[in-house]
Each structure stands twice: as structure tokens, then as C-alpha cells.
Amino acid sequence: MKEPIIDDVAADLEPTFPKLSSQGVNVFYGDKKVIDNVSLSIKEKTVTAFIGPSGCGKSTFLRLFNRMNDYIDIFRKEGDILIDGQDIYHASVKVEELRKKVGMVFQKPNPFPKSIFENVAYGLKIQGIKDKKILAESVEKSLRASALWDEVKDDLNKSALALSGGQQQRICIARALAVKPSIILMDEPASALDPIASAKIEELIHQLKKDYTIVIVTHNMQQAGRVSDNTAFFYIGELIEYTETKTLFTSPEHELTENYITGRFG
Amino acid sequence: MVKSNMTNFERELDQLKKDIIKMMILVSSQLEKSEVAFSNQDVAIAKEIHHIERRVDASDLSIDKECENLIALYNPVAGDLRLILASIKIISNLERVGDHADKIARYVRKKQIKNAYPKKLLQSVKLDVLFDEAQAMMEIAIQAFIEEDSAVAREVFAKDIIMNEIYSNAITQMHHYAEKKDAPTNQLLYLFSVINKLERVGDLAKNIAEETIFYLDAKILKHHKVKRLEDLENL
């Protein structure tokens, strides 16, 4: 395999003050190395797609940024993961505080078996906010930001489980937005949705980019092309190529990238 | 040859390349025949060129449609996308080469050239060399596409410099003849038109080579000025 070309990336991929960055990161599950010396920087208020075949480490790498891997007993990390220049694995960092800053949306919509309102207000209530006016305002704001308000404003007390898959996913996004994160991690957020619901999520990602830094793991090449500014291609734990999305999908530098995105393997 | 482990999309791309190569061969034969038709004022060959022209036009339309379908159905990216984009432009350039060959043949078909050309005139403008260079440029551009070799495609640029020199000399000679008292005006006008068309064929061959390089190396050479052989090193 050729050397990764991460030294050769476009200027905006090396922001002076990156929102997110990793420096020489290795991840092990037991003895197995699943992320191999990955360094990359992500600029604020951009959308970055992580792509690569199943098992390439892209989801593991994504989860480093909100310390979701900490729950795995055999997980071990080397190197630094920084958000706004701060090492988020430092002993002084409280994971709960970190996750307020870094929201996450999963592949399968996972609303709680509660009302729409309670779902979106959940994080705020955990934080101890009880003021009904503040809660109501925050729920409306989050539902508007997730492009769901007009569809559910008259049914806020209805169970979130009664909504369609696409709506449930947007409830999950609203729930993440309610605690005012600055980063949203999305792990295949539209893979369980039909094309119309998927298109709504993609449009939402475009709108959210104004205020949030978004990192999305996707298996859908066209989706990566449509929603992201930059794309990182992972293969067997290595970052093979990280560049502007339009460059990656028209003239990738690396043969492995070309073979993957053109469907020659994976 | 279609490999058995190819995906359907790969088979479609393979077919696209084959269709373009067939069109290249047709256009190449038009150009070759146009020299014979013009040099010998051979009406039968001139008519043959026109028959081929219809097949070239049909290929142009069907390959265009093929490319449109591939983009719509397969969402191609990277090298696949570049092949399809390059193909659309290559066939457009091929079709224009065919047009030029057919227009040269039309002068013969319509018997518009009243008298035989003085040998001295044809020699001084080096018409045979112009025909040969235009054909050679097309052959190299075609070879580069078939063999998927961008180094071969770059040879077309070197040829274009030579072509431009011969063209420039031809125009000077034409001026010289036109200023003569008993200048064969009718013949000179047609000859001037043929020379211009051959120079344009050279440019179109260069465009085809540029598109092949874009497909293979993702490099855009369009609008690069190559006036001297040294300029080629920067491409």
C-alpha cells in the first residue's frame, strides 16, 4: 500500500484553529490495531464525510470524538483527539460535558418511548432545566432547526414512536440540537430511510452546516458527494486520502480510493 | 475482450470505448479517402466519404445517448466519470473531423474545381505533407485512446507545432500565388479552404488527445499554449 497522502491536502484541510483534530491516533481492540496513525483536522462549520468499506475503522474513528468507544472494555487509544485545541481524553474532561458539545445521531432512529416534546426536552431535563417556558422555547427551536416543526407542532404530546422513520431520525437530530452542541456526529444517519426521507436529512445537513460542525459516516457514495465539503477515505484502519469532496470524487490521488468509489471493491 | 468478472457497468464502459474506437476508425478512413479524392479529383471516392459521413453522424448520436444513459443510471465518479465526459467531447471532435473530410470531398463531388492544379502550386504549399500530418495526428490521438497511453497522446502536441509551421508556410505560398497576374483564383480559393480544413483537423486531433489525457491523468490541458517543443515539458 502506498503512503497515505495526508501531507498533501488542500489548504482548508489544515485550518489554523481546527474544530476537531486527531494527531497520530492509533486505536486497539485488545491486541488488534483498528486505527493506524491517523492525523486529520476538521474546520469549523463544515461537513466532513468518512467513507470506506465495512470494518475500515471509520465509525470507530468517528466515535473517538465523543468518547463512545470508552464503553468497550478492550478499547485502547494512543495519540491525541482535540476539540477546539483541547485534549478530550484528558483526565480533567467530564464526558457528560463533552457530549453536550458533541451530539450524535445513529444509523437507526432511536427515539425514546415518550412524547415528541419529552424526547426533544430530554437532554435539557437531564441538565436540570425545569422552566416550562425555556423548555418549550428550546423544543420549538430544535424542531424548527431539524425541519420538523411544521409537521409535528400540533402533535407534540403524541408518542415519537408513532412518527415515520424519517421523522423519527429528525426527532433524534432535534434531541441532539436541544442541548446546544457545536459538533454533530452522524453514523450512517440515512441508511435506514427511504430516498425521500433521506433527501430531507441531507437537506437538513446543508442547513445545519451554518451553525454546526458535522462529521458523517456513510456507505452511500452519492450521499457523501452531495452533503460534504471534505471526504476522508479509510481502508483497514488507515486514512488513505483526505481531500475536498469534489476532488476525491473526480480525480482521487490514490488508486485504492479510485477503486473503492468506483465500486471496484468494497 | 469482455472479461467474465466485469460488473455490468464495466461492460457498459467497455462497450462505450469500443463504440468510440469504431467511430474513430470511420473518421480516420474519411480523412484518408479525402486525400485520394482531392488529389485525383475522384468523384466515386468523394461519394464514398459522404456515405461514411452518415454512419459517423449516427455514431455521434448513439454514443451521446449512451453517455447520457451511463450518467443517469450509474452515477459514475472519478476515472469512470472522466471517461464519459471525455467521450462526449471526443465524439464531438471526431464528428467535426468527419465534416471537414466530407466538405473537402464535396468540392470533388460537385466538380467545383474547374481545372487541374498545377503541380508546382501543390508542391509549394506541400499539400501532401499537410494531409499526411493531419492523418498522422489523428492516428496518434486514436492510438493514445485505444492504448490508454497519455504519453502517446502528448505526441500529438509535438505534431501540432510541425503542422502549424507547414500551414503557415502554405499560407505564405498562397499569398505569393494570389498576387500573380494570371492567378488561378477558383483553384486557389478551394485550395485555401482545404488547407484551412486540414489545419483544423490537426487542432481537433489535439482536442481528442487533451480529452484522453483528462480521462487518464485527470489533467486539464485545454487552452494551454504550446508554441515550442520546450513548452511540452510543462504539460
Image (spheres, coloured by chain):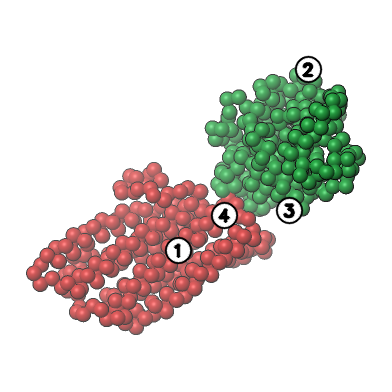
Chain colours: A green, B red
Q: Quick one: label 2, few (<14), some, or many (20+) residues within 10 Å?
A: few
Which chain is home to disc 2? Answer: A
Q: Quadrant of residue B163?
A: bottom left
Question: Could you tell me which secondary element the residue under label 3 belongs to?
Answer: helix
Furthest-left residue in this view: B181
> Where is residue A156 shown, x and y percent of the image?
85, 40
Whichever of callouts 3 and 2 sits on the residue coming sooner in the sequence is 2
Q: Amino acid at mark 2?
A: Ala
Find out whether the residues at labels 4 and 1 contact each other: C-beta distance under 8 Å: no
Q: Secondary structure at mark 1?
A: helix
Q: Tag 3: residue type?
A: Pro
Q: CA distance from mark 3 to mark 2?
A: 43 Å
Query: Do the residues at pointers 4 and 3 share their chain?
Result: no
Q: In whole angstroms, how far apart are the C-alphas of marks 1 and 2?
A: 65 Å
Q: Is A105 located above or below residue A82 in the figure?
A: below
Using the image, tell me which numbered label, if any, was put on residue B81: 4
Disc 3 from disc 1: Cα separation: 36 Å
| Residue position for label 1 | B92
- Does dot 2 land on a helix, a strand or a loop? loop
* Element on which disc 4 rests: helix
At horizontal 30% and vertical 81% (from top left) the residue drawn is: B110
Residue that appears at 42% across and 49% down: B221
Residue bearing the label numbered 2? A91
Name the mark on residue B156: none
Q: Which residue is mark 3?
A: A195
